[in-house]
């Protein structure tokens, strides 16, 4: 069970406004890959993005942290969530908020 509830999640659109519905992520080797921006949200002041590969639409979605642009960088940065507990909590919360409510 996640340490967050539906009330903690706030849907946002800052990435969509900055990049549009599609983004390209660059790997460490310098190759870029296109992704579709499925959702973006904030939990307790931290922003997250849900992306799916445009080339492999049946793959799992990617859940990434959104960091604000730094001093020399205007645009926000998308980074991997390295903390397993954070990833698990945010992933569960996203699933809870996007899957139908079971009223049984």
Image: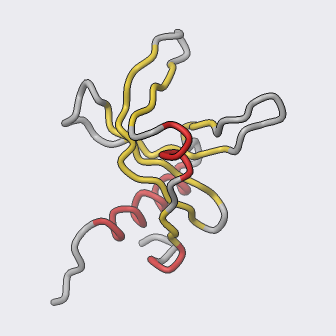
Taking the image as shown, residue 74 lies to the left or right of residue 96, namely right
Could you tell me which residue is drawn at 48 percent across and 59 percent down?
90
Rendered image coloring scheme: secondary structure
- The image position of residue 18, as x and y in percent, is 56, 41
Give the residue at the far bottom of this rendering.
Answer: 104
Could you tell me which residue is drawn at 60 percent across and 45 percent down?
66
Taking the image as shown, residue 20 lies to the left or right of residue 56, namely right
Taking 97 as reference, is 18 above or below it?
Answer: above
Taking the image as shown, residue 102 lies to the left or right of residue 13, namely left
Q: Quadrant of the C terminus?
A: bottom left
In depth, the one of 19 and 66 nearer the eye is 19
Could you tell me which residue is drawn at 66 percent across and 64 percent down?
45
Q: Quadrant of the N terminus?
A: bottom left
Q: Quadrant of residue 33?
A: top left
Taking 48 as reference, is 23 above or below it?
Answer: above
- The image position of residue 78, as x and y in percent, is 57, 37
Could you tell me which residue is drawn at 41 percent across and 47 percent down?
50
Taking 95 as reference, is 84 above or below it?
Answer: above
Give the residue at the far right of this rendering.
Answer: 71
In depth, the one of 103 and 54 nearer the eye is 54
- The image position of residue 23, as x and y in percent, is 44, 31
Q: How many marks?
A: 0
């Amino acid at each position: 069970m996640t340490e967050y509830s539906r009330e903690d999640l706030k849907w946002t659109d800052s990435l969509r406004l900055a990049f549009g519905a599609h983004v390209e992520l660059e790997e460490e080797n310098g190759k870029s890959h296109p992704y579709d921006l499925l959702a973006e949200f904030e939990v307790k002041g931290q922003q997250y993005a849900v992306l799916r590969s445009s080339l492999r639409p049946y793959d799992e979605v990617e859940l990434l942290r959104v960091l604000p642009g730094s001093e020399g960088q205007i645009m926000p940065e998308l980074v991997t969530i390295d903390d397993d507990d954070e990833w698990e909590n945010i992933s569960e919360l996203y699933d809870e908020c996007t899957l139908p409510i079971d009223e049984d």
